[in-house]
Each structure stands twice: as structure tokens, then as C-alpha cells.
Amino acid sequence: MSVVFSLLSLAVPIGLVVLIVMAFRRRGAASAPGTEARGVRRFFQYLLLFALIVVAAIGLSDLLARAFGAERGDYGGGSGLAQSLAFVLVGVPLVALLAWWTRRAHRDDPTEGSSVMYAVYVTLATLTGLAVAMVGLADVLAMAFQAKDFDGGGPATLLVWGGVWAFHWWLARRTLDPIRSAPHLLLGSLIGLGTALVGFVAVLASALEMLLFTETVFGASGRLGGAAAIFVTGALVWMWYWVRSASRAPHSALWFAYVLPIGVGGGLLTAIVAASVVLWQLLVWLLGDPSGPTAAQHFESTPTAAAAAIGGALVWWYHRAVLSVAQAGRTELRRVYEYLVAAIGLVAAASGVGMVLVAAIESFTPGLDLGMSVVNTLLGALTLLLVGVPVWWVFWSGIRRAVAADAPEEIVSPTRRIYLMLLFGLAGVAAVISLIVVVFVLLQDVIEGRVSGETFRAMRYGLGVLVATAAVSAYHGAVYRQDRQIALPERPAGPRSVVLVGQSSPELVRLVEHETGAHADLWTRVDGAAAPWSGDAVLAVLAGHPDEDLLVISERDVLRIVVVDPSGQPPRTVTGDIPSPGPAGGTPWQSS
Amino acid sequence: MKARPNVVLLVVAGLVLVLAVIAALVSASRGELDLDPATPDGTVQLYIKALYEGDEDAALALLDPELGCEEPFQQLYLSESARVGVLETEMDGDTATVVIEVEEESGAGLFESWSHRETFELIAAGDGWLITGEPWPVYYCGNEKVLVD
């Protein structure tokens, strides 16, 4: 409860400041009187509704748990029961009253349903209900799998919070359009995926341990049953949110932000880190100094790592298939995928390069070894190289082949440019931080008059990072310089920015941006006085205005071009009207 | 594709390979340290080695009897593995100070190690040295002895 109230006390002032700023921004526009106050009213209305639902649900689930026979340690003579009763007696009527008032407001004013505060409320309430109900469901399943003794708390939590979730789910589906429901569906998918992955890893690790180390399963800990409960809970949520809903939602920027960095990137990263741990433990057992005399001791954490490697690989494989990046044609999406995977492999390989230097420094600074061996460090470096280099090499070779096949197309792609700049930026930051660490260690020993081989050894991780970033920067610097030497085809000089005013036509916006490189916007005329766009005609008139900001207004039979100055100065020239070819004079760009 | 990036890649790969081979050869050819009980730093290292090898008798023999330490050591925490490097040894007549860097490691992770510096006070005893004060990782055995300069 204290966490909820702390969050609320933080959210109120922040939300108020945001509302006031938004209100002041909106004052310039012709907004109806009272708009600002309505925003503040909505903020408090939905905040209060959310808080009351949380309070009522906490009280109800506690009372229901007691009815189911759950034992509650009421220290101080029934204060817990009194609190739950107060929550229910005050919370439930107020929720009903506020919900009735909100429903009436929605009926009287259709703009209520399209407000941002309402969408935020529905998203938060649904996800809160989901998260708490999942805890209850995992509890109930654990009892069903005999991993846990019966306790009334689990079923009560599931029933009450499941009800909160179900109602808000229904509300979200009924009142939020696909764009506004995307955060809810994607966050729900993420919660389901994360829980399912944790459960999957725990189930597989328990099973492997049972097979390898002959441990009992349904024993005192009941680990397998508890893990299976978490897995089933996560899988159900993921199926409901992702498979049934979000995977079929429009592919917005948020959708790709979920699938690419989280699905593909997160899955692969998990797999690579876990596979490195497994391989390292195996190599240390075969060639290095094992951490225990018996295989069971040395490989104690290996089943979990192996399960995480399999789970991460599955998540990666699935999201890769969802993206369908294997299809023919080199789209920007495929580029993002390939550069992302190459980057993950590169980080592992570069860490391996740094670790080789760490091992070399360790080998040159002998000390009293009590179980820590240089061989293990060297095997760690070898592991990172064995895992990282193949991943990087496979994907980077594909990228190099794409450059060889069509260099201009590949090297001007935003993905490649952002990839190279990000690498230089991150390598620079890592190098500066490690340089500070190295200099700090050196100066510390200089000041204390203790500079020795031990000083050099204490600097080894910092030096390893420096060497790794230097290697990455040197290679990609060479790639970048080579990119710049490749001659690009001449591009006609186009305007800086274009605002098109006429019929709606996203294709025209894309065409103008692609052909001229200008930033293009389209404002739809609602008076019906615009002729259908002709792409050829628009490109023809734009060609005469290099490096200018333009307003292109489609009239019934003319294209009006106005050169504008975004800084607020009056336009320098008005080029006049150019007859519009209309539907018969070129490719018509109908609204879509 | 003229191969400047490829040249850089080859150079990096070559250097990594050479460095790895050197590290492997040097660490393989390195013998065990010859610790001399007649020196303060040898005494400290022999004491820590005895503790890590579970030989509490040998460790106890290197501690000043006035500390009142007895077998088994109470509340003694040792990591799974460690490495000790001597930073500084200062001798002043019958007393000596040894500063060491202790690197400890536990678990089977790649980066699960931490390091700290410890200072040992020693007094001369016969041909060798005895550790006194509050020595890591035993610190205190019940008979606290205050060193007077």
C-alpha cells in the first residue's frame, strides 16, 4: 500500500505540471473556454477512480481470502480486518458513484472517450489488474500442481483482481481504437512473455537438474510445480495478449519497438549470455581449474544457463519469424534486424578481445593463486570469442554482400548510418569511462607510493575495455571511411521542407520525401476544393525551389506554391499559380 | 571492395591470437611461488594459504599467541577462491607492516570477483615473524591486543 500511495503522491504534482504546460500551449489555438480546467478535472477524476479501484480491490481480496480460510496474522487485535472492511465500505460505494458519474460524462460528451487521460487510465487499470491477477493465478496453479499447500489468498486475489482486469479489458476493447490500445496490448504481451520465459527456464532447469543430479521433484521445495505454474500463467497471458491481439494489431512504430529490440534483441542477448556461461563452464571443466571437485558441484548453475540459452533462442527465433525478415527484398526492416543482431555479436566478440588482454595482464603479474587461475580467464575470453564472432561474422558478411551488390542503396540507408554513429558514440563513452578508471587506479598508487605490477593488474579491466573499444572503432572507422569514398548518384536538389495542402495522400508524402529528400507534411483540405494530386506535377514544381521551405496548395485547377520562412519572417516570393493537370494530366493521387 | 577494413580486422585478429598464445604460455610455465617464512610478506601469504587450504593449525602457528586465537576460528568467511598480491612490505626493527591486494571469487560466473586491500601488522619472533593486530579474515579472537609503538 505504501508503494501505491508514494507513487500517487509523486504522480499528482507531475501530472498537474504537465496539464498546466499543455493548457498554456493550447491557449494559442482556438480552444473552447474551459478546456484547461477540463484537463485538470479529468486528471483528478481518473486518478481518484484508479486509486479507489485499487483500494476496494485490496480490501475485497483480503475479505474473500479470509472467507476462503486464509490465515492472516492480525497483530494488534484485528487491525488488518478493520482496514479491509474500511477499504471495502468506503471504496466500493465511491467506485460505484465515480464510475456512474464517469459513464454519464462519456454519454453526454463524446470527446471524453478520446481524451488522453482516459486512455492512460484504462491502460494502467487493465495492466495493474493483470499483474496482480497473474500472481493469484500462479498461486492457484501451484496449488493445483501440488507445489504448495492450499491458501485462500491465491484464489481470492485471482477472483477480485481478475475481475478488475476483465472489466477493463472489455472497456479497452470497446472504447480504445487500435492506435490507442497499442501500449496496453504490447505491455501486456511483454509481461506475459517475460513471465513465460522465466517459468520456462525454471521448468527446464528443474527437469535437467532432476535428470542430471537425481534430485526429487515434488519434494519439499516443489520447484518444478512452482515453475510450471509461473510458465502456464505467463503463457496464457502471452497467448491472450500477443497471439490473439497484439500480433494482429497495426504495425506501428511502437509495435516494431516491441518486436525488434525486445523480441529479437532481448531473446538473442539472453541466448548469447547464457550459452557463454554453459560453454565456459564446460571448457573450465575440461581444460581449466573447476570450481568444485565433483561435476555436480562444478555444473551446479549449468542447467539454468542451458535452459536460459534455449529459452532466449526460442524468443529470438519466434520474433524473427514474426518480422518475416527472411523474405526476398532488402527492406529497411531487414536492415534493422541484421544490424541489431550483428551489434549483439560484436559486443560479445569485443568483450572477448578485452578479456584476452585481461588474461595476458594476469599471466604477467604472478601472485599467490588460491583457486583463481589465469587459464579460466583465458577460457572466458575464448568462450566470448567463440560465441560472439560467428554471430557477428554471419550477419556482418550478409551486410557486406549487400554493400557489394548495391553500395549506394546500402550506405545511404539510415540504419547503417545510425549503426555506425551509435558504435562510435558508445565506444567513445565506454573508452572515456574506462580511461578515468585506469587513471584513478594509477594515481591512487602513485600518491600512496605503491606503484608495482599490482597497479598494472588492478587496471586490467579498464585497459581491456580500452583495447576492445579501440579495436571496434578502428575497424568501423575504416568501414566508415570506405563508405564515404563510394560515389553516390547525383540527386536533384530539392526543397528543404514541403507542406502539401489538398486531398489526403500518404503516397504523395512518401514520393516527395523519397524523390527530393525534403521533409514533407500533408494537411487535408476539408472544404472539398482540391483537385486530386498529380505526383509528376508536384515533383516538377518542387524541382525549381532548391533549399527552400514550401507550401503547396492544391486548388481546383491550379497548384499554388508559396515560399515560406519557418522562422516567422514574411515569404520572400510568391511564385504564382501553376495550372494543375488534374486527374487527366498525370497520375492522380487519390485519397487513401 | 578494396580491403582496408579487412586489413584492420586481420591485424586485430592477429594481435588477439598472439596475446592469447603468450598469456597461455606464460601462465602454463609459471611455477608455484616460493614463500619464505623468514620474511614478513612470506609469513602473511603462508597464513592465507593455510586458511584457504583448511589447515587451521598452520595458520594458527603464524598468529601471535597473545591474540588468543583458537581452533576452530569463529565466524571465518572465505570465498571459494582467491588470489593474493603483495603491494608493500615495511620493516621497522621488530615490527613490520605488509599491505596486500586480495582478489576473491565465488560462484561459477565469468565476472564474479571483487578485490580489496588488507594491512597486516607483524612482530619478529625468533627466526621468523608472527601476525598480530586484527588480521584479515580472522580479525578478532577474543584477546584484543593493542600495539604500542
Image (cartoon, coloured by chain):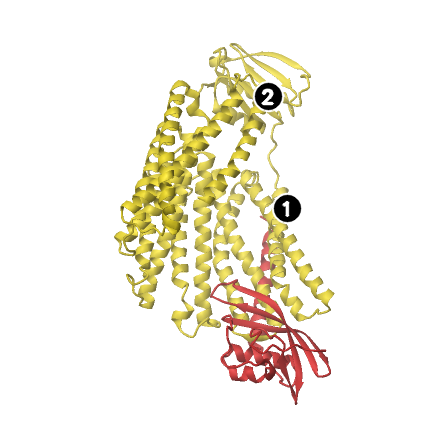
Chain colours: A yellow, B red
- Quadrant including the C terminus of chain A: top left
Q: Could you tell me residue A521's position as x and y percent?
A: 54, 24
> In which quarter of the view is residue A159 placed?
top left
Q: Report the chain holding disc 1.
A: A
Residue A471 visible? The answer is: yes
Q: Is residue B84 above or below residue A29?
A: below
Q: Tell me the kind of residue under disc 2.
A: Leu
Q: Could you tell me residue A91's position as x and y percent?
A: 38, 35
Q: Is residue A79 left or right of residue A116?
A: left
Cα gap from disc 2 to disc 1, whole angstroms: 33 Å
Q: Which residue is mark 1?
A: A481
Q: Are marks 2 and 1 in contact (CB under 8 Å)?
A: no
Badge 2 and badge 1 both on one subunit: yes
Q: Tell me the kind of residue under disc 1.
A: Arg
> In which quarter of the view is residue A176 placed?
top left
Judged from this view, the residue extending furthest toward the front is: A77
Q: Which residue is mark 2?
A: A542
